[in-house]
Amino acid sequence: MNLKRIRAIAKKEFKHLFRDIRMLLILLLFPVFLLGIFGYAVNFDVHHIKIVVYDEENSMISKEFINSLTKSTYFDLVGYINNDSQIREILDEKKAQGIVVISKSFSKDFYSKQEAKIQFLIDGVDGNTANIIQFYSTAATQSLNAKLTTEVLSRVGTKSFMPIDLRPIFWFNPDLKSTRFFIPGLIAMILIITAAVSVSLSLVREKERGTIEQINVSSIKSSELLIGKTLPYVLLALVNAAMILIAGYILFDVVVKGSYPLLFLSTLIFLIASTSIGILVSVVSDSQQVAFSIATMVTMLPSFILSGFVFPIESMPAIIQVITNITPAKFFINVLRAIVLRGVGVFAIWDQLLYLILYASILLGAAILIYNKKEAKN
Amino acid sequence: MNSIEVKNLTKKFGDFVSVDNISFNVKQAEIFGFLGANGAGKSTTIRMLCGILEPTFGDAVVGGCSVAKNPDSVKQNIGYMSQRFSLYNDLAVGENLDFFGGVYGLSNQKLNERKKWVLKIANLEGKENLLTGSLPGGIKQRLALGAAVIHQPDIVFLDEPTSGVDPISRRNFWELINELSSEGTTVFVTTHYLEEAEFCNNIILIDAGRLIAEGNPKQLKTDYLKNSIYEIESDRVIEALELLEKQNFVVETSIFGNNIHISVEEKFNDLSRINKLCEEGGITIKRINKIVPTLEDVFIHLLGNEKIL
């Protein structure tokens, strides 16, 4: 290995990068842009669900019930109806996602110590949201129930108590914001795409232009070439990672709880794994177009679907769980969630880092094998 | 002293023999022409001589190092310029030279000195901030050659360096090649232009991986072509060609611009017979004379008409 030669290559690569300012700006700003889009759009928190009330009774208790729903930010009361023929129309036209129906006999049932029934009609088209609506409304009803029970019992002179009082407390993400959960996944996805694509393009460009021949006949070793060529893109990706974290802090209050050196080291290892995807892609493709398509396909889809970014891996079928190992994003997301959200140390993530190193070695090995096989044929 | 000694060099790709047991020597500081049709095995041979392709059999000693045993040391002593323009169009002239100088381990004063030299031979003095892509073809070619020899190698391989360059630039380029050779650099060059081959000190011709002729241009013309060549100018070129082809004293025919070259049996010297034949066929002969064969005549003779370079 000759540092002088590596420096010459890296320097040249930087010049390519800075010559094309437009491309450089895209590489730098696109990740932040993606973060903004994803951060605000991919949001599974459900707030401000529009509900309509069909209150046939208009009693004190029915009003109290409705109050208990609407005092949180989860439900917004958008109107009353007084005719059940309107129910269909409201759900059809999506004027509201839920309708609370309180029957005429509500207070009567309540005071006669029968179960007072309330109907909650929920638009079930979006199953996930419907589930959340049900969860919120049940929770609201329960707390009202507890309050009412206490009142009723105290009137007859009995002290009330709850047999079991479960009080969940959410660690690491106390208000259960899904953006906080998504940001590590986003960082992983953005980094793996930019690193793999930019490295594969820069290597294939040399092939396409024929400049690789000139480099092959020089005394540069392939290891020097690869290090020199990937170094600028790894640095660029590190800058990207920093920018995403800063943007994450400004836009979504995501604070890195763990150690920055460990975060840096893990990111570096992940980038080496990501660039090895780019190197492998560059070996099998002969034009920038092909390299771009392959590199985006093999990085984007798996890092979105199989990495645990959006869909939890634990709930996938066993065979798919095995397949999830094809993306290094899976391991890096574990690492990021550990460092950024939980603030744990290296003891909790060393195995994930080891996987990443193993992954990079396997891919680089494959790239060298295929490259040598191809060379022998030419 | 020999710069390059090739012995029984062979390369097989599966069953296909690309280079078939060729041997030749290249003397130090000579301009050595390496000729052959497309697919004859030229590029494969050059790749082996540059140490980037391992020979199946045989060996070559290039600048004192064996390409089979020690390809990496070979690379230190050679320069290479490919048929495709291989500098970076999006980098400035100076940046390209910095890169190729750096690749060969040059730095500081040495690099500056060599950069100056390259800029001078490429007529680009004071223009090192120009974007390489904006240069005219001839200048680019000179710059590429300069970059290929920036580390002052003993031997430089030029693979069809003048393809796609205008005639004047081509002539200037050959002056540059002569300069390099007179300074002691061995120049190993392939070309499709046979008038360029005339500038070489020595030439070899390969066909289907085999060496079929070698020598200096003069030797090639006398040793390999025993027949006499006549150049005929007539009013109806194609008809004249068809007519002459049929005659049994004619060995070969070919078209050179508006003229026909025929090679005839050694003992034939009856020009009036040609005149008479053409007259009977209604063709007017404007001029007919015996000529010194060109390299093209020799190669057409050696390769047959179907494989014009």
Image (cartoon, coloured by chain):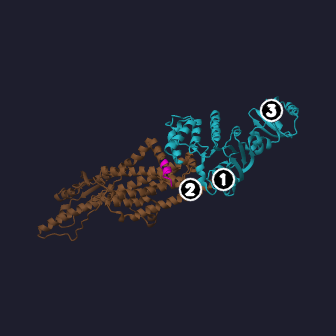
Chain colours: A brown, B cyan
Q: Is residue A355 left or right of residue A74?
A: right
Residue A267 to residue A209: above or below: below
Q: Quadrant of residue A173?
A: bottom left
Q: Are marks 3 and 1 in contact (CB under 8 Å)?
A: no
The residue beneath circle 3 is B232
Q: Quadrant of residue A108?
A: bottom left
Q: CA distance from mark 2 to mark 3?
A: 55 Å
- Looking at the rendered structure, which numbered label has been put on residue A371? 2
Question: How many labels sit on residues?
Answer: 3
> How many neighbours does mark 2 have within 10 angstroms: few (below 14), some (14-19), or many (20 or more)?
some
What amino acid type is highlighted by mark number 2? Tyr
Q: Secondary structure at mark 2?
A: helix
- Looking at the rendered structure, which numbered label has been put on residue B61? 1
Q: State which chain disc 2 sits on.
A: A
Q: State which chain disc 3 sits on.
A: B
| Res A12 seen here | yes
Please state, as top left, top right, bottom left or bottom right, where the C terminus of chain B lies in the image.
top right
